[in-house]
Amino acid sequence: MLWIRMELPCWCLLLLSCLQSLSAHNDFFTSIGQMTDLLYTEKDLVTSLKDYIKAEESKLEQVKRWADKLDSLTATATQDPEGFLGHPVNAFKLMKRLNTEWGNLESLVLSDTTDGFISNLTIQRQHFPTDEDQTGAAKALLRLQDTYRLDANTISTGNLPGVKHKSHMTVEDCYELGKIAYSEVDYYHTELWMAQALKQLDDGEESTLDKVTVLDYLSYAIYQQGEIERALEYTKRLLELDPEHQRAKGNLKYFEFQLEKQKKAADAETEKQKEQGTTNTTEKKKVKKRSPKTFSLIPERKKYEMLCRGEGIRMTPRRQSRLFCRYYDSNRNPKYVLGPVKQQDEWDRPYIVRYLDIISDAEMERIKQLAKPRLRRATISNPVTGVLETASYRISKSAWLTGYDDPMIDTINQRIEDLTGLEMDTAEELQIANYGVGGQYEPHFDFGRKDEPDAFKELGTGNRIATWLFYMSNVSAGGATVFPDVGAAVWPQKGTAVFWYNLFASGEGDYSTRHAACPVLVGNKWVSNKWIHERGQEWRRPCGLSEAE
Protein backbone atom coordinates (compact mmCIF):
# COMPACT_ATOMS: atom_id res chain seq x y z
CA MET A 1 0.00 0.00 0.00
CA LEU A 2 2.97 2.27 0.80
CA TRP A 3 4.41 2.10 -2.73
CA ILE A 4 1.09 3.20 -4.21
CA ARG A 5 1.01 6.28 -2.00
CA MET A 6 4.59 7.17 -2.89
CA GLU A 7 3.79 7.06 -6.58
CA LEU A 8 0.99 9.64 -6.30
CA PRO A 9 2.25 12.80 -8.02
CA CYS A 10 2.24 16.17 -6.24
CA TRP A 11 -0.74 17.40 -8.27
CA CYS A 12 -2.88 14.79 -6.54
CA LEU A 13 -2.06 16.19 -3.09
CA LEU A 14 -2.90 19.70 -4.28
CA LEU A 15 -6.12 18.49 -5.85
CA LEU A 16 -7.19 16.65 -2.69
CA SER A 17 -6.67 19.81 -0.62
CA CYS A 18 -8.80 21.71 -3.15
CA LEU A 19 -11.49 19.05 -2.98
CA GLN A 20 -11.67 19.32 0.81
CA SER A 21 -13.20 22.76 0.35
CA LEU A 22 -15.63 21.35 -2.23
CA SER A 23 -16.73 18.58 0.12
CA ALA A 24 -18.24 21.16 2.46
CA HIS A 25 -20.75 22.15 -0.21
CA ASN A 26 -23.55 20.49 -2.11
CA ASP A 27 -26.28 21.72 -4.47
CA PHE A 28 -23.59 22.98 -6.85
CA PHE A 29 -26.20 23.98 -9.44
CA THR A 30 -27.59 26.68 -7.12
CA SER A 31 -24.46 28.90 -7.30
CA ILE A 32 -22.44 29.79 -10.40
CA GLY A 33 -19.73 31.25 -8.15
CA GLN A 34 -19.07 27.91 -6.46
CA MET A 35 -19.41 25.97 -9.70
CA THR A 36 -16.27 27.71 -11.00
CA ASP A 37 -14.26 25.51 -8.59
CA LEU A 38 -15.57 22.48 -10.47
CA LEU A 39 -13.98 23.72 -13.68
CA TYR A 40 -10.56 23.70 -12.03
CA THR A 41 -11.32 20.28 -10.56
CA GLU A 42 -12.23 19.02 -14.01
CA LYS A 43 -9.09 20.56 -15.49
CA ASP A 44 -7.00 18.77 -12.86
CA LEU A 45 -8.78 15.54 -13.70
CA VAL A 46 -7.80 15.99 -17.33
CA THR A 47 -4.18 16.46 -16.24
CA SER A 48 -4.41 13.23 -14.29
CA LEU A 49 -5.95 11.48 -17.23
CA LYS A 50 -3.26 12.67 -19.63
CA ASP A 51 -0.51 11.46 -17.26
CA TYR A 52 -2.11 8.02 -17.32
CA ILE A 53 -2.45 8.06 -21.10
CA LYS A 54 1.30 8.62 -21.52
CA ALA A 55 1.88 5.27 -19.78
CA GLU A 56 -0.93 3.35 -21.47
CA GLU A 57 -1.26 5.11 -24.84
CA SER A 58 -1.05 1.96 -26.91
CA LYS A 59 -3.95 0.34 -25.00
CA LEU A 60 -6.21 3.34 -24.47
CA GLU A 61 -6.57 5.28 -27.72
CA GLN A 62 -10.25 5.85 -27.06
CA VAL A 63 -9.54 7.34 -23.65
CA LYS A 64 -6.89 9.63 -25.16
CA ARG A 65 -9.41 11.13 -27.60
CA TRP A 66 -11.74 11.89 -24.68
CA ALA A 67 -8.94 13.59 -22.73
CA ASP A 68 -7.89 15.76 -25.69
CA LYS A 69 -11.47 16.96 -26.10
CA LEU A 70 -11.77 17.96 -22.45
CA ASP A 71 -8.29 19.48 -22.36
CA SER A 72 -9.21 22.14 -24.91
CA LEU A 73 -12.61 22.75 -23.27
CA THR A 74 -11.23 23.28 -19.76
CA ALA A 75 -8.37 25.45 -21.05
CA THR A 76 -10.93 27.84 -22.53
CA ALA A 77 -13.27 27.64 -19.55
CA THR A 78 -10.67 28.41 -16.87
CA GLN A 79 -9.59 31.60 -18.64
CA ASP A 80 -12.98 33.10 -17.76
CA PRO A 81 -14.76 30.62 -15.43
CA GLU A 82 -17.73 32.79 -14.45
CA GLY A 83 -18.30 33.99 -18.00
CA PHE A 84 -18.09 30.40 -19.29
CA LEU A 85 -20.56 29.09 -16.68
CA GLY A 86 -22.80 32.10 -17.26
CA HIS A 87 -23.98 30.23 -20.35
CA PRO A 88 -26.62 27.82 -18.93
CA VAL A 89 -25.79 25.11 -21.51
CA ASN A 90 -22.14 25.10 -20.35
CA ALA A 91 -23.31 24.78 -16.74
CA PHE A 92 -25.68 21.92 -17.62
CA LYS A 93 -23.00 20.12 -19.62
CA LEU A 94 -20.53 20.51 -16.73
CA MET A 95 -23.06 18.84 -14.39
CA LYS A 96 -23.69 16.12 -16.97
CA ARG A 97 -20.01 15.46 -17.63
CA LEU A 98 -19.01 15.20 -14.00
CA ASN A 99 -22.07 13.25 -12.87
CA THR A 100 -22.52 10.85 -15.81
CA GLU A 101 -19.79 10.80 -18.42
CA TRP A 102 -16.80 10.55 -16.10
CA GLY A 103 -18.53 7.56 -14.47
CA ASN A 104 -18.85 5.89 -17.87
CA LEU A 105 -15.16 6.54 -18.46
CA GLU A 106 -14.35 4.91 -15.14
CA SER A 107 -16.08 1.70 -16.26
CA LEU A 108 -14.07 1.72 -19.50
CA VAL A 109 -10.74 2.17 -17.76
CA LEU A 110 -11.54 -0.56 -15.20
CA SER A 111 -11.28 -3.12 -17.98
CA ASP A 112 -7.48 -2.65 -17.85
CA THR A 113 -4.84 -2.51 -15.12
CA THR A 114 -5.21 1.14 -14.16
CA ASP A 115 -4.56 1.28 -10.42
CA GLY A 116 -3.13 4.81 -10.30
CA PHE A 117 -5.71 6.68 -12.37
CA ILE A 118 -8.74 4.80 -11.05
CA SER A 119 -7.64 5.33 -7.45
CA ASN A 120 -7.41 9.07 -8.02
CA LEU A 121 -10.67 9.32 -9.94
CA THR A 122 -12.57 7.24 -7.41
CA ILE A 123 -11.41 9.49 -4.57
CA GLN A 124 -12.27 12.66 -6.47
CA ARG A 125 -15.73 11.47 -7.51
CA GLN A 126 -16.81 11.64 -3.87
CA HIS A 127 -16.82 15.42 -4.33
CA PHE A 128 -18.48 15.52 -7.75
CA PRO A 129 -21.98 16.88 -8.46
CA THR A 130 -24.79 14.43 -7.81
CA ASP A 131 -27.86 13.35 -9.74
CA GLU A 132 -29.68 16.18 -7.95
CA ASP A 133 -27.22 18.69 -9.42
CA GLN A 134 -27.59 17.33 -12.94
CA THR A 135 -31.37 17.28 -12.64
CA GLY A 136 -31.34 20.78 -11.14
CA ALA A 137 -29.26 22.11 -14.04
CA ALA A 138 -31.58 20.41 -16.53
CA LYS A 139 -34.70 21.84 -14.90
CA ALA A 140 -33.04 25.26 -15.01
CA LEU A 141 -32.71 24.99 -18.80
CA LEU A 142 -36.38 24.05 -19.06
CA ARG A 143 -37.33 26.98 -16.81
CA LEU A 144 -35.31 29.39 -18.95
CA GLN A 145 -36.93 27.94 -22.06
CA ASP A 146 -40.41 28.69 -20.71
CA THR A 147 -39.73 32.06 -19.08
CA TYR A 148 -37.93 33.56 -22.06
CA ARG A 149 -39.91 31.68 -24.74
CA LEU A 150 -36.89 30.00 -26.31
CA ASP A 151 -37.26 27.11 -28.72
CA ALA A 152 -35.17 23.99 -28.23
CA ASN A 153 -33.06 24.67 -31.33
CA THR A 154 -32.04 28.13 -30.06
CA ILE A 155 -30.76 26.63 -26.80
CA SER A 156 -29.17 23.64 -28.53
CA THR A 157 -27.19 25.81 -30.95
CA GLY A 158 -26.18 28.16 -28.12
CA ASN A 159 -27.64 31.26 -29.77
CA LEU A 160 -28.48 33.06 -26.53
CA PRO A 161 -28.24 36.86 -26.11
CA GLY A 162 -24.96 38.21 -24.74
CA VAL A 163 -23.06 34.89 -24.69
CA LYS A 164 -19.24 34.93 -24.62
CA HIS A 165 -18.72 31.20 -24.92
CA LYS A 166 -21.10 29.67 -27.42
CA SER A 167 -21.79 26.00 -26.72
CA HIS A 168 -23.56 23.43 -28.88
CA MET A 169 -25.68 20.64 -27.39
CA THR A 170 -25.13 17.16 -28.81
CA VAL A 171 -27.84 14.60 -29.56
CA GLU A 172 -26.95 12.94 -26.25
CA ASP A 173 -27.39 16.24 -24.37
CA CYS A 174 -30.84 16.82 -25.88
CA TYR A 175 -31.84 13.22 -25.20
CA GLU A 176 -30.67 13.50 -21.56
CA LEU A 177 -32.71 16.67 -21.08
CA GLY A 178 -35.79 14.98 -22.57
CA LYS A 179 -35.26 11.93 -20.37
CA ILE A 180 -35.07 14.06 -17.21
CA ALA A 181 -38.32 15.79 -18.22
CA TYR A 182 -39.84 12.33 -18.83
CA SER A 183 -38.83 11.16 -15.34
CA GLU A 184 -40.64 14.23 -13.95
CA VAL A 185 -43.78 13.27 -15.94
CA ASP A 186 -43.26 16.47 -17.95
CA TYR A 187 -44.34 15.22 -21.38
CA TYR A 188 -44.43 18.72 -22.90
CA HIS A 189 -40.68 19.22 -22.48
CA THR A 190 -40.01 15.56 -23.22
CA GLU A 191 -41.52 16.09 -26.66
CA LEU A 192 -39.56 19.32 -27.29
CA TRP A 193 -36.18 17.81 -26.50
CA MET A 194 -36.71 14.38 -28.03
CA ALA A 195 -37.86 16.17 -31.20
CA GLN A 196 -34.66 18.26 -31.10
CA ALA A 197 -32.54 15.13 -30.68
CA LEU A 198 -34.35 13.55 -33.65
CA LYS A 199 -33.83 16.70 -35.75
CA GLN A 200 -30.09 16.64 -35.11
CA LEU A 201 -29.95 12.94 -36.00
CA ASP A 202 -31.91 13.64 -39.20
CA ASP A 203 -29.43 16.43 -40.01
CA GLY A 204 -26.63 13.87 -39.97
CA GLU A 205 -25.03 14.46 -36.55
CA GLU A 206 -23.01 11.45 -35.43
CA SER A 207 -24.22 9.88 -32.21
CA THR A 208 -24.14 6.67 -30.21
CA LEU A 209 -27.93 7.04 -29.88
CA ASP A 210 -30.21 5.58 -32.52
CA LYS A 211 -33.42 7.08 -33.87
CA VAL A 212 -35.48 4.14 -32.60
CA THR A 213 -34.76 5.01 -28.95
CA VAL A 214 -35.59 8.68 -29.49
CA LEU A 215 -38.78 7.93 -31.45
CA ASP A 216 -39.96 5.58 -28.70
CA TYR A 217 -39.87 8.39 -26.12
CA LEU A 218 -41.19 10.97 -28.57
CA SER A 219 -44.28 9.04 -29.66
CA TYR A 220 -45.21 8.20 -26.07
CA ALA A 221 -44.79 11.82 -24.89
CA ILE A 222 -47.03 13.04 -27.71
CA TYR A 223 -49.64 10.37 -26.91
CA GLN A 224 -49.67 11.45 -23.25
CA GLN A 225 -50.59 14.96 -24.40
CA GLY A 226 -53.64 13.59 -26.22
CA GLU A 227 -52.34 13.88 -29.81
CA ILE A 228 -52.91 10.29 -30.87
CA GLU A 229 -52.71 10.96 -34.60
CA ARG A 230 -49.19 12.45 -34.35
CA ALA A 231 -48.14 9.69 -31.95
CA LEU A 232 -49.29 7.16 -34.58
CA GLU A 233 -47.16 8.84 -37.28
CA TYR A 234 -43.99 8.61 -35.18
CA THR A 235 -44.79 5.02 -34.21
CA LYS A 236 -45.05 4.07 -37.89
CA ARG A 237 -41.70 5.74 -38.53
CA LEU A 238 -40.18 3.76 -35.64
CA LEU A 239 -41.48 0.50 -37.09
CA GLU A 240 -39.98 1.33 -40.48
CA LEU A 241 -36.59 1.40 -38.75
CA ASP A 242 -37.24 -1.58 -36.45
CA PRO A 243 -40.18 -3.75 -37.65
CA GLU A 244 -39.77 -6.15 -34.69
CA HIS A 245 -40.05 -3.49 -31.95
CA GLN A 246 -42.61 -5.14 -29.66
CA ARG A 247 -43.80 -2.06 -27.76
CA ALA A 248 -44.23 -0.08 -30.98
CA LYS A 249 -46.24 -2.90 -32.56
CA GLY A 250 -48.58 -2.92 -29.58
CA ASN A 251 -48.85 0.89 -29.58
CA LEU A 252 -49.67 0.91 -33.29
CA LYS A 253 -52.74 -1.27 -32.76
CA TYR A 254 -53.80 0.70 -29.67
CA PHE A 255 -53.46 4.11 -31.38
CA GLU A 256 -55.39 2.93 -34.45
CA PHE A 257 -58.15 1.58 -32.20
CA GLN A 258 -58.36 4.87 -30.25
CA LEU A 259 -58.48 6.95 -33.43
CA GLU A 260 -61.29 4.81 -34.83
CA LYS A 261 -63.13 5.16 -31.54
CA GLN A 262 -62.71 8.95 -31.64
CA LYS A 263 -63.92 9.08 -35.25
CA LYS A 264 -67.09 7.17 -34.39
CA ALA A 265 -67.76 9.41 -31.41
CA ALA A 266 -67.23 12.53 -33.57
CA ASP A 267 -69.60 11.20 -36.26
CA ALA A 268 -72.25 10.46 -33.65
CA GLU A 269 -71.88 13.96 -32.20
CA THR A 270 -72.21 15.51 -35.67
CA GLU A 271 -75.46 13.61 -36.30
CA LYS A 272 -76.78 14.67 -32.93
CA GLN A 273 -75.99 18.33 -33.67
CA LYS A 274 -77.79 18.13 -37.02
CA GLU A 275 -80.89 16.81 -35.29
CA GLN A 276 -80.74 19.52 -32.61
CA GLY A 277 -79.51 22.31 -34.88
CA THR A 278 -82.24 24.77 -33.92
CA THR A 279 -81.76 24.29 -30.19
CA ASN A 280 -77.97 24.76 -30.42
CA THR A 281 -78.40 27.98 -32.41
CA THR A 282 -80.70 29.37 -29.72
CA GLU A 283 -78.25 28.36 -26.97
CA LYS A 284 -75.33 30.03 -28.72
CA LYS A 285 -77.17 33.35 -28.70
CA LYS A 286 -77.47 33.13 -24.92
CA VAL A 287 -73.69 32.78 -24.33
CA LYS A 288 -72.32 35.96 -22.82
CA LYS A 289 -69.16 37.49 -24.18
CA ARG A 290 -66.23 37.89 -21.80
CA SER A 291 -66.01 41.47 -20.62
CA PRO A 292 -62.84 43.44 -21.40
CA LYS A 293 -62.31 43.91 -17.67
CA THR A 294 -62.26 40.16 -17.02
CA PHE A 295 -60.02 39.57 -20.02
CA SER A 296 -57.48 42.06 -18.73
CA LEU A 297 -56.92 40.12 -15.49
CA ILE A 298 -53.56 38.41 -16.03
CA PRO A 299 -52.35 35.69 -13.61
CA GLU A 300 -49.32 36.67 -11.54
CA ARG A 301 -47.12 33.97 -13.07
CA LYS A 302 -47.74 35.30 -16.56
CA LYS A 303 -47.10 38.91 -15.49
CA TYR A 304 -43.88 37.81 -13.80
CA GLU A 305 -42.61 36.06 -16.95
CA MET A 306 -43.65 38.99 -19.17
CA LEU A 307 -41.70 41.43 -17.01
CA CYS A 308 -38.67 39.11 -17.04
CA ARG A 309 -38.75 39.28 -20.86
CA GLY A 310 -38.96 43.08 -20.76
CA GLU A 311 -42.64 43.09 -21.68
CA GLY A 312 -45.65 44.08 -19.62
CA ILE A 313 -46.95 47.37 -18.24
CA ARG A 314 -45.50 50.64 -19.53
CA MET A 315 -45.74 53.89 -17.56
CA THR A 316 -47.80 56.69 -19.03
CA PRO A 317 -45.77 59.70 -20.22
CA ARG A 318 -47.31 61.74 -17.41
CA ARG A 319 -46.05 59.30 -14.75
CA GLN A 320 -42.65 59.02 -16.42
CA SER A 321 -42.29 62.81 -16.37
CA ARG A 322 -42.41 62.67 -12.56
CA LEU A 323 -39.34 60.42 -12.31
CA PHE A 324 -36.06 62.26 -11.91
CA CYS A 325 -32.33 61.74 -11.43
CA ARG A 326 -30.43 63.97 -9.03
CA TYR A 327 -27.34 64.50 -6.92
CA TYR A 328 -28.38 63.51 -3.41
CA ASP A 329 -26.75 64.73 -0.17
CA SER A 330 -29.11 62.85 2.20
CA ASN A 331 -30.57 65.97 3.85
CA ARG A 332 -27.19 67.72 3.92
CA ASN A 333 -25.36 64.84 5.56
CA PRO A 334 -21.79 66.12 6.13
CA LYS A 335 -20.36 63.12 4.24
CA TYR A 336 -22.28 63.99 1.09
CA VAL A 337 -22.53 67.79 1.05
CA LEU A 338 -19.35 68.18 -1.03
CA GLY A 339 -19.60 64.80 -2.73
CA PRO A 340 -23.30 63.95 -3.25
CA VAL A 341 -24.25 60.55 -4.66
CA LYS A 342 -26.09 59.96 -7.92
CA GLN A 343 -29.70 58.94 -7.34
CA GLN A 344 -32.42 58.13 -9.84
CA ASP A 345 -36.10 57.21 -9.53
CA GLU A 346 -36.95 53.75 -10.86
CA TRP A 347 -40.67 53.66 -10.02
CA ASP A 348 -43.26 55.87 -8.36
CA ARG A 349 -45.73 53.52 -6.60
CA PRO A 350 -44.11 51.88 -4.69
CA TYR A 351 -41.30 54.38 -4.66
CA ILE A 352 -38.13 52.60 -5.77
CA VAL A 353 -34.91 54.57 -5.99
CA ARG A 354 -31.49 53.55 -7.38
CA TYR A 355 -28.10 54.81 -6.16
CA LEU A 356 -25.35 54.76 -8.81
CA ASP A 357 -21.64 54.04 -8.19
CA ILE A 358 -22.48 53.44 -4.56
CA ILE A 359 -20.11 50.51 -3.93
CA SER A 360 -16.59 50.17 -5.34
CA ASP A 361 -15.12 47.29 -7.33
CA ALA A 362 -12.66 46.59 -4.51
CA GLU A 363 -15.49 46.37 -1.97
CA MET A 364 -17.54 44.07 -4.20
CA GLU A 365 -14.59 41.74 -4.80
CA ARG A 366 -13.79 41.61 -1.08
CA ILE A 367 -17.42 40.77 -0.24
CA LYS A 368 -17.43 37.95 -2.82
CA GLN A 369 -14.10 36.67 -1.48
CA LEU A 370 -15.45 36.58 2.09
CA ALA A 371 -18.80 35.07 1.10
CA LYS A 372 -17.77 32.39 -1.37
CA PRO A 373 -16.51 29.75 1.13
CA ARG A 374 -19.60 30.36 3.31
CA LEU A 375 -22.24 30.11 0.61
CA ARG A 376 -25.02 27.65 1.45
CA ARG A 377 -28.28 26.84 -0.33
CA ALA A 378 -30.74 29.69 0.24
CA THR A 379 -33.79 28.77 2.31
CA ILE A 380 -37.31 30.09 2.83
CA SER A 381 -39.42 30.14 5.98
CA ASN A 382 -42.26 27.61 5.84
CA PRO A 383 -45.41 29.72 6.39
CA VAL A 384 -47.06 26.92 8.38
CA THR A 385 -44.21 25.53 10.53
CA GLY A 386 -41.81 28.48 10.44
CA VAL A 387 -38.97 26.02 9.73
CA LEU A 388 -36.28 27.11 7.25
CA GLU A 389 -36.22 24.84 4.18
CA THR A 390 -35.01 24.82 0.58
CA ALA A 391 -37.50 25.44 -2.23
CA SER A 392 -37.50 24.88 -5.99
CA TYR A 393 -38.62 28.47 -6.54
CA ARG A 394 -35.48 29.90 -4.89
CA ILE A 395 -32.34 28.83 -6.74
CA SER A 396 -29.35 30.55 -5.15
CA LYS A 397 -26.80 30.28 -2.36
CA SER A 398 -26.34 32.87 0.35
CA ALA A 399 -23.96 33.87 3.12
CA TRP A 400 -24.13 36.43 5.94
CA LEU A 401 -21.37 38.92 6.81
CA THR A 402 -20.78 41.28 9.76
CA GLY A 403 -18.15 43.77 10.85
CA TYR A 404 -16.43 40.95 12.73
CA ASP A 405 -15.62 39.35 9.37
CA ASP A 406 -14.16 42.56 7.97
CA PRO A 407 -14.37 46.22 9.16
CA MET A 408 -15.37 47.10 5.58
CA ILE A 409 -18.83 45.60 6.28
CA ASP A 410 -19.35 48.18 9.05
CA THR A 411 -18.36 50.91 6.58
CA ILE A 412 -20.97 49.67 4.11
CA ASN A 413 -23.64 49.45 6.81
CA GLN A 414 -22.88 53.03 7.85
CA ARG A 415 -23.18 54.16 4.24
CA ILE A 416 -26.67 52.61 4.04
CA GLU A 417 -27.63 54.35 7.30
CA ASP A 418 -26.34 57.71 6.09
CA LEU A 419 -28.26 57.51 2.80
CA THR A 420 -31.55 56.09 4.12
CA GLY A 421 -31.59 57.86 7.47
CA LEU A 422 -32.57 54.57 9.10
CA GLU A 423 -31.01 52.83 12.10
CA MET A 424 -28.77 49.86 11.21
CA ASP A 425 -28.25 48.44 14.73
CA THR A 426 -31.55 46.53 14.48
CA ALA A 427 -31.10 45.55 10.82
CA GLU A 428 -30.21 42.01 9.76
CA GLU A 429 -26.66 41.11 8.79
CA LEU A 430 -25.56 41.82 5.23
CA GLN A 431 -26.77 38.90 3.11
CA ILE A 432 -24.79 37.97 -0.01
CA ALA A 433 -26.46 35.85 -2.68
CA ASN A 434 -25.07 34.19 -5.80
CA TYR A 435 -27.57 32.72 -8.24
CA GLY A 436 -27.13 29.33 -9.89
CA VAL A 437 -28.05 27.93 -13.29
CA GLY A 438 -31.25 29.74 -14.25
CA GLY A 439 -31.13 31.19 -10.71
CA GLN A 440 -34.34 32.84 -9.54
CA TYR A 441 -36.56 33.71 -6.59
CA GLU A 442 -40.24 33.67 -7.51
CA PRO A 443 -42.71 36.37 -6.28
CA HIS A 444 -42.56 36.94 -2.52
CA PHE A 445 -42.84 39.61 0.17
CA ASP A 446 -39.87 40.71 2.27
CA PHE A 447 -42.10 41.71 5.20
CA GLY A 448 -44.17 39.48 7.47
CA ARG A 449 -47.92 39.56 6.77
CA LYS A 450 -50.73 39.56 9.33
CA ASP A 451 -51.24 35.82 8.82
CA GLU A 452 -47.59 35.32 9.91
CA PRO A 453 -47.65 36.74 13.46
CA ASP A 454 -44.43 34.94 14.43
CA ALA A 455 -42.36 36.22 11.49
CA PHE A 456 -39.05 37.66 12.82
CA LYS A 457 -40.32 37.15 16.38
CA GLU A 458 -37.00 35.63 17.46
CA LEU A 459 -35.16 38.79 16.29
CA GLY A 460 -37.23 41.05 18.54
CA THR A 461 -36.78 43.96 16.13
CA GLY A 462 -40.21 44.12 14.53
CA ASN A 463 -41.09 43.75 10.87
CA ARG A 464 -38.88 44.48 7.86
CA ILE A 465 -39.54 48.15 7.21
CA ALA A 466 -37.32 48.48 4.13
CA THR A 467 -35.01 46.65 1.71
CA TRP A 468 -31.62 47.80 0.38
CA LEU A 469 -30.26 45.73 -2.52
CA PHE A 470 -26.73 46.01 -3.98
CA TYR A 471 -26.08 44.70 -7.52
CA MET A 472 -22.52 43.35 -7.50
CA SER A 473 -22.32 42.12 -11.10
CA ASN A 474 -23.71 42.86 -14.51
CA VAL A 475 -25.90 40.17 -16.04
CA SER A 476 -25.75 39.60 -19.80
CA ALA A 477 -29.40 38.51 -20.08
CA GLY A 478 -32.22 38.05 -17.58
CA GLY A 479 -31.90 38.45 -13.82
CA ALA A 480 -34.16 41.50 -13.38
CA THR A 481 -35.89 42.33 -10.09
CA VAL A 482 -39.58 42.64 -10.98
CA PHE A 483 -42.70 43.77 -9.14
CA PRO A 484 -45.60 41.91 -10.87
CA ASP A 485 -48.45 43.77 -9.14
CA VAL A 486 -47.35 47.16 -10.49
CA GLY A 487 -45.36 46.19 -13.59
CA ALA A 488 -41.97 47.50 -12.45
CA ALA A 489 -38.72 45.90 -13.64
CA VAL A 490 -35.33 46.89 -12.23
CA TRP A 491 -32.33 45.55 -14.17
CA PRO A 492 -28.98 44.61 -12.57
CA GLN A 493 -26.27 47.25 -12.93
CA LYS A 494 -22.95 46.56 -11.24
CA GLY A 495 -22.02 49.03 -8.50
CA THR A 496 -25.57 50.30 -7.96
CA ALA A 497 -28.15 49.71 -5.24
CA VAL A 498 -31.92 50.00 -5.09
CA PHE A 499 -34.00 50.88 -2.03
CA TRP A 500 -37.70 50.68 -1.20
CA TYR A 501 -39.97 50.68 1.86
CA ASN A 502 -41.86 47.44 2.55
CA LEU A 503 -44.13 49.08 5.13
CA PHE A 504 -46.14 52.28 5.06
CA ALA A 505 -45.29 54.85 7.75
CA SER A 506 -48.29 53.48 9.69
CA GLY A 507 -46.55 50.10 9.96
CA GLU A 508 -49.00 48.40 7.59
CA GLY A 509 -47.52 46.25 4.84
CA ASP A 510 -47.29 47.67 1.31
CA TYR A 511 -48.51 44.73 -0.77
CA SER A 512 -47.41 46.40 -3.99
CA THR A 513 -43.80 45.56 -3.00
CA ARG A 514 -44.30 41.88 -3.81
CA HIS A 515 -41.29 41.16 -6.03
CA ALA A 516 -39.24 38.45 -7.66
CA ALA A 517 -35.75 37.77 -9.03
CA CYS A 518 -36.05 36.65 -12.66
CA PRO A 519 -34.08 33.59 -13.85
CA VAL A 520 -30.55 34.43 -14.99
CA LEU A 521 -30.46 33.55 -18.68
CA VAL A 522 -26.80 34.35 -19.39
CA GLY A 523 -24.26 35.56 -16.85
CA ASN A 524 -23.43 35.35 -13.16
CA LYS A 525 -25.57 37.34 -10.73
CA TRP A 526 -24.18 38.50 -7.39
CA VAL A 527 -26.27 40.66 -5.05
CA SER A 528 -26.12 41.67 -1.40
CA ASN A 529 -29.03 43.00 0.58
CA LYS A 530 -29.78 44.62 3.90
CA TRP A 531 -33.17 44.05 5.51
CA ILE A 532 -33.94 47.00 7.80
CA HIS A 533 -36.34 46.49 10.73
CA GLU A 534 -38.86 48.70 12.56
CA ARG A 535 -37.19 48.97 15.97
CA GLY A 536 -35.04 52.07 16.29
CA GLN A 537 -36.86 53.93 13.53
CA GLU A 538 -39.47 55.55 15.79
CA TRP A 539 -37.92 59.02 15.51
CA ARG A 540 -36.33 58.51 12.12
CA ARG A 541 -39.56 57.59 10.35
CA PRO A 542 -42.51 58.65 12.55
CA CYS A 543 -45.74 56.68 12.33
CA GLY A 544 -48.38 57.90 9.87
CA LEU A 545 -51.98 58.68 10.81
CA SER A 546 -53.63 56.49 8.17
CA GLU A 547 -52.97 52.89 7.10
CA ALA A 548 -51.71 53.76 3.61
CA GLU A 549 -49.66 56.78 4.69
Image (tube, rainbow, N blue to C red):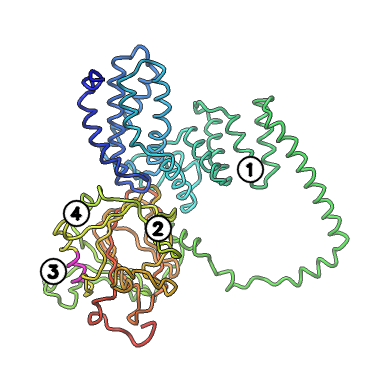
Q: Is residue 234 above or below residue 83?
A: above
What residue is shown with label 2? 441
Q: Nearer the viewer, residue 354 or 402?
A: 402
Distance from label 3 to label 4 (Cα)?
Answer: 19 Å
Q: What residue did someone put label 1 on?
A: 222
Q: What's the CA distance linking mark 2 and mark 4?
A: 25 Å
Q: Which residue is mark 3?
A: 339
The residue pinned by badge 4 equals: 361
Q: Nearer the viewer, residue 92 or 124?
A: 124
Span shown in magenta:
413-419
**Circle nearer the N terminus (3, 4):** 3
For residue 183, which quarter of the picture?
Answer: top right
Task: Quarter of the image for the N terminus: give it.
Answer: top left
Q: Which residue does the image show at 31% across and 18% down from the upper left?
A: 53
- Give the percent coordinates (x, y) of residue 370: 21, 51
Q: Position of residue 518 (x, y in %)?
A: 40, 57
Under tag 1, what secondary structure?
Answer: helix
